Amino acid sequence: LNTEVAVKKAMELADTDGAIIHLLHVLRDVNPRSLSAAAKLVHSKGMNHSYASELLKQWKTSIEETASAIQVHYYVVPSGSVRDSIERMATELKTDLIVIGKRSKPGWFSFPATVVPVKIAESTGCPVFTVRPGALHNKIKTIVVPVNDSIPENKMEIIAALCKKLRIKVHLVTFANGESEPNGHSASSLLKMYQWLKNSMHCPVEYAVLRGYNKPKAVLQYAEKIHADILLLNPSTETKIGWLNRHISDVLPPHSRVQVLTVQQAI
């Protein structure tokens, strides 16, 4: 199911002319002696290299039959770290976007072994799109974009690409300074983004001023309230929603339609 939702969203966003989709499966290279009895049973039934390759080959055929202009390559990589493999392949292939399908939420004590999409975005500089099964049959129509003190040029590039591919509506959100209005810098950035979307992108746009000490939580609640499809966030500053380094993309339930697209601001 994770593969299905990731592939479907990759195809929805891919350029119809000349796009390349790389399918990556990481075979976990773990020491069975370190596993519990239950984990050993799961490990013994896991995929081997040839079986994983055959499944990816089937996905390659399915994608290319559906969209003949898209090229598909696939890789099965043995590694002790899924995250390291994703980062290495993304860097080597110079990918424009990493798409990760996630069905389950991490447990309280599984953080060291968990693939955290925002960390991949930070380390690679590549946008990372995290999708849940709840978004499988939903077309991308509505995007929520937080705006702070500076013009987010990285987000503008993403929005421009999405506007060319899809018919979307953008909701800009910023935060009030205390109980009143946004501070001057945030208000200026919001206005410039609003004008750019209206005049240059010709994209439907609305804005909202949010309140709350936990800004990522407030943005997520707003996205759920308006039934948004994508949250376009900076992984370093706009995703941490709770203690123990929990991020929005990690706490969404499997049925959530909210998809998280993180893009690192260029330095």
Image (cartoon, rainbow, N blue to C red):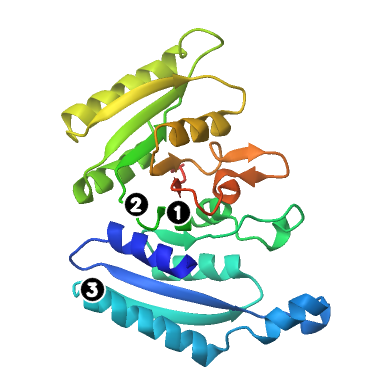
Of 31 and 127, which appears nearest the observer?
A: 31
User: Which residue is at a point 69% across and 63% down the rendered structure image?
Assistant: 113
Q: Name the residue under label 2.
A: 138
User: Which residue is at a point 53% across and 19% down the rendered structure image?
Assistant: 211
Label ID, residue 66? 3
Of 211 and 245, which appears nearest the observer?
A: 211
Q: Alpha carbon of mark 2 to alpha carbon of mark 3: how far?
A: 18 Å
For disc 3, the neighbor class at 10 Å (few under 14, some 14 to 19, many from 20) is: few
User: Which residue is at a point 52% across and 65% down the rendered structure image?
Assistant: 87
Of circles 1 and 3, the one toward us is: 1
Q: Mark 1 points at which residue?
A: 134
Give amino acid for label 1.
Answer: Gly
Residue 236: quadrant of the picture: top right
Question: Relative to residue 155, is residue 112 depicted above or below?
Answer: below
Upstream in the sequence, badge 2 or badge 3? 3
Residue 149 makes an appearance in the image: no
